[in-house]
Amino acid sequence: MATSILLQGGTVLVHDENDHVNPIKADILIEGNTISKIGAGIAATSGVQVIDCTDKILSPGFVDTHHHVWQTLLKGRHANDLLLDYFGHGNFTKSIHTPEDLFWGQLAGCLECLDVGTTTVVDHAHLNNSPESTTISSGIRSVFCYCPTGRVESWKPFTLSQNPLAPWVIDLLDELAAKAPFGDDGKVSLGFAFDDLYLPKEVLAGIYGRVKSLGIKVNTTHYVRNALTGFSSMIETLDSYDLLDSSFLFSHATNATPADAALLAKTKSHVSTTPSTELQMAQGQSAAFHPTIDMTPQCGVGIDCQSNQSASIPSELRLLLQSSRGVYNQKFMDGGKIPKKVNHTAEEAFNLGTVGGARAAKMEGKIGTLKAGAYADILVLDALSPSMVCGAQHDPVATIVLNSSPRDIEMVIVGGVVRKEGGRLKSVDVKSGREMWGGVERDVLEWKDVSRELVKRREVIQRKIEGIDMEEARRGVIAAFHIDESLVVDSI
């Protein structure tokens, strides 16, 4: 339950109307789930919890705009995977997860987000069930994007279900929409994720018309243009069907066209850039900070798969910033020249994880920013930690992007409720999901309880995976996705 909290004497990172971040010495008063006042010398009235923030940085919580949160039990499997490998090793193994596995994976994924400073996540939940109670229990703010998706009907021979829009799938969407938003404070809203955009215009018009009628404000879909997925423009297709609008959030948009960029700006639709998976899995140059096409104003940043790398948004911002600088600088090196200035700034990167993410998640002004009236989604970072000291005093924004680690985040507040304190996650109450989980006979769990259950379940998942012929699964994916296998080569 949210109460009144006064964060006293910290360095507050405040955005102005031009997205410039001004570090100011100030207090933040939280009343209920919102920030009611930011200023110096705010008096603490009776009943207000006062937290001394001397030598602390107070930052907006980070916004993760693309994440498959359920995948916790698959961690460690994708370090050397390309996208084609990932489908069998990762995405389609949802079919061997039990509902309980998904509950625990989802809970742990949400808690990892909180631990690393993410206070809002757009969850592309391609698992055909509804773990909204899990997400509620974690305390994170989430756009839970329910996803009709194909499942593996048989691993041998490899066979995918042919009807992701089965009646029960659509019925469940209707049921979820009738309940949304979820939780007493409504922190978990309902979005819609759908990747079968090859379907005829009339089918897509019917689907998105129904979604709009349900009041859903976020439509997300994967969009990658390359030899594996094809070179047609999903953005242009949706626009030609009169379906493209500001509700759309395209994950990746790698190798997008200039026409795509123009349509994104025109319709105020957005992109989630996920640098780690895009760079590793040969998806193409990230849309944000692209060297030739300006899509950055329409971009947020996401994790994609915490099964592949850390869920830390600052880590992704760091990777994106430095890799884009490397691409930019190489042109000068190749020409025997010296660049006159650095390409893109740490502040631009920071904004992708805060105000940019808020716009992509369709919550501009409510998240990703510290101001009166915004949700009280706040990080408290230690400005004297070994990673942060001196940098935090000189340029706290740059230091968060380039120097910080999750260890530096001492406190995480979501909607006025403390979810991490003293560098440790708070306990979670999972009573609301009792019918979906098992293995621990308590309603209130510490992280150690969750982690022990995860380790046991990972071992069961591993035994199931060992019984799968992954080479046959790979061939099945190639056939199902109509991939030209002659294009899969060792060198070029």
Image (tube, grey):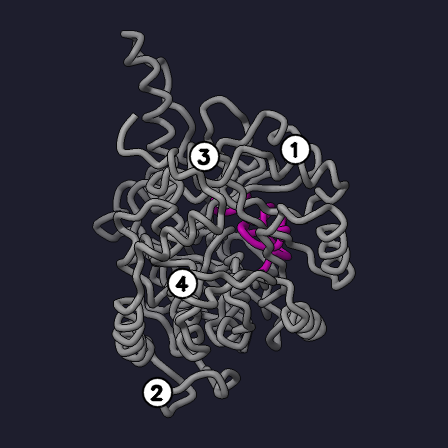
Q: Are marks 1 and 3 in contact (CB under 8 Å)?
A: no
Q: Residues within 10 Å of mark 3 (few under 14, many from 20)?
A: few
Q: Work out how far the residue at label 2 is from the one at label 3, CA to CA, in angstroms.
A: 44 Å
Quarter where residue 158 is shown = bottom left
Identify the mark nearer the N-term, 2 or 3. Answer: 3
Q: Residue at x 43, y 88 (%)?
A: 443
Q: Quadrant of residue 89?
A: bottom left
Mark earlier in primary sequence (4, 3): 4
Mark 2–mark 3 contact, CB under 8 Å? no
- Residue type of the residue flagged with mark 2: Gly
Total numbered circles: 4
Q: Residue at x 29, y 76 (%)?
A: 460
User: Tag 2, which secondary structure?
Assistant: loop
Q: Which residue is mark 4?
A: 157
| Residue at the extreme front | 157
Q: Position of residue 50 (x, y in %)?
A: 45, 69
The residue to which callout 2 is attached is 439
* Location of residue 211 with respect to 49 vertically, above or below: above
Residue type at the position of mark 1: Ala
Q: Earlier in the sequence, mark 2 or mark 4?
A: 4
- Label 1 sits on a secondary structure element that is helix
- Distance Cα–Cα, label 1 vs label 2: 49 Å
Q: Is residue 464 left or right of residue 225?
A: left
Q: Report whether residue 260 is seen.
A: yes
**Region rendered in magenta:** 352-375
Q: Distance between the Cα atoms at labels 1 and 4?
A: 45 Å
Circle 3 sits in a helix, a strand or a loop, which is it? loop
What amino acid is at disc 3?
Answer: Ala
Dot 4 alpha-carbon crowd within 10 angstroms: few under 14, some 14 to 19, many 20 or more: few
Residue 398 visible in rendering: no
Q: Which residue lies under the disc numbered 3?
A: 227
